[in-house]
Image (cartoon, coloured by chain):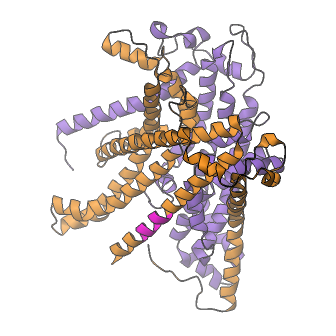
């Protein structure tokens, strides 16, 4: 970062500055409007609906929802909704298994790619493929792989010499394993990609300089590698944690949240509420609780990061 | 760096294993797509890993040719869902790129935009499922439900953060001196943008657009909630390729899945060197 840069032609102040400000405003206006359109107005609408027992089945417009006003009943209900809490726990379980697994596998692979070797570019391109596959299609791939008469069992049978016919997707705990395997398959490449970029960046930038200045391996690792990799590791983990929290496509195609509710994450639970139960007032309440919690978390994270970066620059 | 032969052996062993794990699911789907019915219905001991009698029947089937062996013909072919996916993704990309790169230019050059960057990060943070209720209500009201243009509008907004952050890093990197020189020579701001900035940004714009296209093309959840019949996209349509009579139409699904998987893989390889930047909101460059 180069710090504060002067606007072009800053010397000629006055009219020019005003014109620039105006142009800047016009340029950002479409994006502002789109955000307003999808965020602010809908948020207010959601807040309003969340205080009512409104559902599209009532046949009346959402603006008439006040006639079904139930104050904070939806929120009270949410606090004692066991299905919600277990969906949340399941979402967190998937997160604490998948994100570290993807991180470790990605980091391991990335360290192997730090220097040149024969076939590196081709291997690299192939390893990135899973994250480019449409998640719904990936879900379908693993749906096929984990059928009881499917290739995974076939492979296991061949390896063990016995006839294995595990019903992966209809066993509550194995279905969870299958879903996690699919997520790890698809998103380890992302960790690999980001961490490798970090490792290579460190190498090229400063390591040679440090070596020239006489730093030994340990000094290089502690003073250069670690601080630089720390930011990158945080970014990689943050991205995967956020995305993993939303998990829906792959999982829903593989199991539909089942068997029963065995793999039901919060996105799947909300989806079922939206389409089956049609209790939209309740869904709006859940949505607002999620949005509020995440916004607070983001605020804390940003202020922490701000502090950390000022400390670093000092 | 010089490495020992033992290390090289270890490295190739690990990489070959990783490549195998990477490719098996994709290869299995590709193999299913070219299998005749008897082979894709086979399970357990009759399972064939590679099609013995490769055929294009599955592709013909999803494009409307009735199958005598399945005794079913599709009520609707895959042609329109493919069109829906294409239209919604392409126009969604155009919306995101137009609004996103304009805002990025405004912020990069004039420090305009206020808290827009933060709002856009927030937009990305939220699970889409949690904001779909108001969107569904609004879209029903605006008669945008079950249309590709309604879907394109949501896609444009959902991927706006990526378009914005990607283009912002590219604009930040572009040397200002060139624009300034043109300004000094008397060009208007707009002309400078049109004749100097835009041509220089052609490659970054193209890579960003491809990146955004991949994201739009990959959507399932939004289309699942906003399209019901006329303009369902490929992933939503896929679910209809099974019936109580025939069960899962594995071959047809695999063929369609293969069609859906190919464009983003090609686009992804084309923009490989910008992937890190895109995925980390420009925080990291390769």
Quadrant position of residue A127: top left
Q: Position of residue A97 (x, y in %)?
A: 39, 40
Q: Tell me where the magenta segment starts and ends, as one range.
A: A299-306
Q: From the image, which quarter does the N terminus of chain A lie in?
A: bottom left
Quadrant position of residue B224: top right
Residue, x 66% and y 27% (percent of image)? B239
**Prevalent SS, magenta region:** helix
Query: Is A163 included in the stretch rendered in magenta?
Result: no
Answer yes or no: is residue B80 visible.
Answer: yes
Q: From the image, which quarter does the C terminus of chain A lie in?
A: bottom left
Residue, x 63% and y 92% (percent of image)? A13
Say which colour chain B has.
purple
- Would you say A74 lies left or right of B30 here? right
- Would you say B168 lies left or right of A307 here? right
Foreground: A108 or B202? A108
Query: Is A305 included in the stretch rendered in magenta?
Result: yes
Chain shown orange: that is: A
Residue, x 58% and y 18% (percent of image)? B34
| Residue A99 in the image: above or below residue A231 | above
Q: Position of residue B195 (x, y in %)?
A: 68, 70
Q: Position of residue A261 (x, y in %)?
A: 54, 31
| Residue A119 in the image: above or below residue B70 | below
């Amino acid at each position: 970062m180069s710090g504060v840069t002067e606007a072009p032609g800053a010397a000629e102040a006055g009219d020019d500055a005003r014109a620039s400000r105006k142009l800047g405003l016009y340029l950002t206006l479409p994006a502002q409007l789109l955000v307003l359109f999808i965020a602010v107005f809908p948020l207010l609408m959601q807040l309003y609906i969340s205080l009512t027992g409104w559902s599209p089945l009532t046949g009346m417009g959402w603006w008439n929802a006040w006639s079904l006003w139930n104050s904070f009943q939806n929120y009270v209900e949410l606090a004692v909704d066991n299905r919600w809490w277990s969906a949340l726990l399941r979402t967190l379980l998937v997160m604490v298994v998948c994100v570290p697994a993807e991180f470790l596998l990605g980091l391991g692979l990335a360290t192997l790619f730090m220097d040149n070797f024969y076939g590196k570019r081709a291997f690299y391109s192939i390893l990135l493929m899973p994250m480019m596959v449409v998640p719904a299609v990936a879900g379908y791939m693993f749906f096929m792989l984990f059928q009881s008469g499917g290739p995974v069992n076939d492979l296991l049978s061949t390896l063990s010499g016995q006839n294995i016919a595990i019903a992966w997707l209809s066993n509550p705990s194995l279905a969870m394993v299958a879903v996690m395997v699919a997520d790890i398959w698809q998103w380890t490449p992302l960790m690999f990609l980001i961490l490798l970029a970090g490792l290579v960046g460190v190498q090229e930038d400063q390591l040679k300089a440090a070596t020239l200045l006489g730093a030994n391996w340990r000094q290089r690792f502690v003073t250069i590698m670690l601080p630089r990799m720390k930011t990158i590791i945080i970014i990689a983990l943050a991205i995967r944690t956020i995305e993993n929290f939303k998990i829906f496509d792959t999982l829903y195609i593989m199991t539909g949240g089942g068997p029963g509710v065995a793999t039901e994450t919060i996105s799947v639970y909300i989806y079922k509420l939206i389409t089956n139960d049609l209790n939209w007032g309740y869904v709006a309440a859940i949505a607002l609780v999620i949005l509020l919690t995440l916004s607070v978390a983001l605020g804390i994270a940003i202020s922490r990061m701000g502090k950390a970066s000022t400390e670093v620059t000092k | 760096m010089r490495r020992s032969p033992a290390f090289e052996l270890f490295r190739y062993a690990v990489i070959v294993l990783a490549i195998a794990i990477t490719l098996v699911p994709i290869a299995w789907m590709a193999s299913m797509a070219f299998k005749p019915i008897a082979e894709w219905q086979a399970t357990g001991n009759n399972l064939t890993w590679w099609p013995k009698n490769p055929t294009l029947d599955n592709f013909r089937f999803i494009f409307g040719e009735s199958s005598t062996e399945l005794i079913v013909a599709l009520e609707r072919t895959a042609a329109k869902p493919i069109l829906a996916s294409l239209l919604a993704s392409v126009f969604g990309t155009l919306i995101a790129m137009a609004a996103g790169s304009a805002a990025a230019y405004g912020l990069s050059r004039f420090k305009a935009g206020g808290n827009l960057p933060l709002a856009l990060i927030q937009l990305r943070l939220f699970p889409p499922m949690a904001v779909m209720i108001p969107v569904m209500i609004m879209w029903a009201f605006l008669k945008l439900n079950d249309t590709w243009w309604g879907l394109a509008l949501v896609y444009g907004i959902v991927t706006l953060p990526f378009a914005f952050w990607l283009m912002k890093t590219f604009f930040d990197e572009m040397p200002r001196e060139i624009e300034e020189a043109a300004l000094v020579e008397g060009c208007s701001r707009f002309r400078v943008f049109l004749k100097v900035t835009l041509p220089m940004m052609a490659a970054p714009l193209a890579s960003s657009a491809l990146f955004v296209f991949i994201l739009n093309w990959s959507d399932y959840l939004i289309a699942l909630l906003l399209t019901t019949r006329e303009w369902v996209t490929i992933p939503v349509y896929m679910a209809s390729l099974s019936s109580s009579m025939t069960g899962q139409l594995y071959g047809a699904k695999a063929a369609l899945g293969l069609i859906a998987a190919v464009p983003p893989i090609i686009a992804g390889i084309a923009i490989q060197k910008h992937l890190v930047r895109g995925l980390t909101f420009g925080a990291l460059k390769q």
